[in-house]
Image (cartoon, helix red, strand yellow):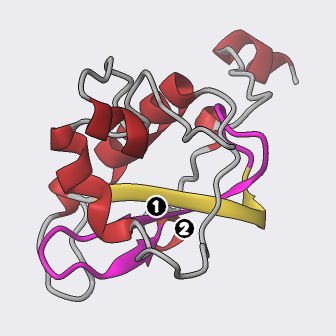
Amino acid sequence: MNTPLLYTRCLRCGRALKDHKSKSRGYGPECWQKVKHAIPPQGAPLTETRSIENIFTVNAVYDSIRVRVSSHSCPSCGALLSSAEVHSYDHEDGLNLRGFLRPQWVYVTCSGCRVDIALHKLTRNGCGDLCKHYRQVSIAEALRA
């Protein structure tokens, strides 16, 4: 007999989960309201998988991405993306982000019209500093090269 998996920390924010309902779904009540639209209905095939290595690092990376896109407007409705939700899924052509085991295809969901926008369509300067094995180069090093 399999016992259901119970989480001790929220998969979105990392806070401790207190009640049984939150522990069984992996999200506290506030975070659940923010992510439940992205969870497929019971019985539907799971189309998005994420190979998370460290949820706390993932949350920090998502926060950085959220800040980077906050000044952009949604191409569909024109709303600022300051409250957009960041999502990702495993994709061989994605970014090798810190906190994940596999490359991620990153997109944001506009909070106004709910359209999904690929990250590469919003930021041309890239997110290399959020990737694994990124090393910042000092000005002195750059001048020597």
Q: Is residue 127 magenta?
A: no
- Indicate whether 123 appears above or below 54: below
Identified by mark 2, the residue type is His
Q: Is residue 93 left or right of residue 33?
A: right
Question: Circle 2 is placed at which residue position?
Answer: 120
Number of residues whose C-alpha sits closer than 10 Å to that of mark 1, classed few (under 14), some (14–19) or many (20 or more): few
Question: Circle 1 is placed at which residue position?
Answer: 123
Marks 2 and 1 close (CB-CB < 8 Å): yes
> On the rendered image, what quadrant is the N terminus found in?
top right
Identified by mark 1, the residue type is Thr
The magenta segment: 96-118
Image quadrant assignment for residue 98: top right
Residue 25 rendering spot, x and y as whole percentages: 39, 45
- Indicate whether 6 appears above or below 135: below
> On the rendered image, what quadrant is the C terminus found in?
top right
Q: Is residue 111 magenta?
A: yes
Front residue of 61 and 39: 39
Q: Secondary structure at mark 1?
A: loop
Q: Is residue 21 left or right of residue 78?
A: right
Res 105 seen here: no
Number of residues whose C-alpha sits closer than 10 Å to that of mark 2, classed few (under 14), some (14–19) or many (20 or more): some
